Image (spheres, grey):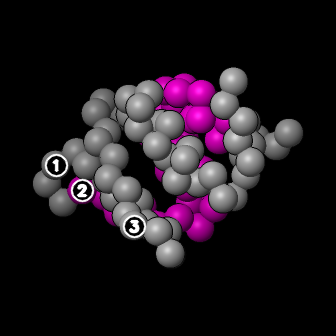
Amino acid sequence: MSKLEKRLRALANGAELPWSKIVALLESLGVNVQAPTGGSHYKIFLIGKPPLTIPVHNGRVKKIYAKKIAEFLSEFIDVDEQ
C-alpha cells in the first residue's frame, strides 16, 4: 500500500491529519485547494464535482471533515471503512 493510499484510508477512518499533509495529498491527486480570503474555510475543487468547503483551525480539521474529504476523493482510490 502506498503512502497516498495510507493517508486516504486514514482520512476515511476519521484520523486527524495535519492540514499541510491533507493539502499535499489533495494536490498530488490534482485537486485545487483555494485558501480562505478572510476566514478559516478552505475550498476544494475537483472537475465534475461541486466544491467542498472545509474549516481549518490550528492547522487541523475535525474528524467529520476528514471523512468528507475521503468521500470527495473516493473515485481515486477504493477506501474501505472499517
Q: Residue at x 56, y 44 (%)?
A: 70
Residue 66 spot, x, y in % from top left: 48, 36
Amino acid beneath label 2: Pro
Measured in 3D between alpha carbons, the distance from the residue under mark 2 to the one under mark 3, in whole angstroms, is: 17 Å
Classify residue 1 by image quadrant. Answer: top right
> Under tag 2, what secondary structure?
loop
Amino acid beneath label 1: Gly
Mark 2 surroundings: few (<14), some (14-19) or many (≥20) residues within 10 A: some
Residue 7 shows in the view? no
Asked if the magenta segment contains residue 17, the reply would be: yes
Q: Residue at x 70, y 41 (%)?
A: 79
Q: Residue at x 22, y 45 (%)?
A: 40
Amino acid beneath label 3: Pro
N-terminal of the two: label 1 or label 3? 1
Asked if the magenta segment contains residue 28, the reply would be: yes
Taking the image as shown, residue 56 lies to the left or right of residue 81, namely left
N-terminal of the two: label 2 or label 3? 2
The residue to which callout 2 is attached is: 36
The residue to which callout 3 is attached is: 50
Question: Which residues fall within the magenta stretch?
Answer: 8-36
The residue to which callout 1 is attached is: 39
Measured in 3D between alpha carbons, the distance from the residue under mark 2 to the one under mark 1, in whole angstroms, is: 6 Å
Q: Nearer the viewer, residue 36 or 9?
A: 9
Asked if the residues shown at circle 2 and circle 1 are in contact, with their CB atoms under 8 angstroms apart, the answer is: yes
Residue 38 spot, x, y in % from top left: 14, 54
Extreme-right residue of the structure: 1
Classify residue 37 by image quadrant. Answer: bottom left
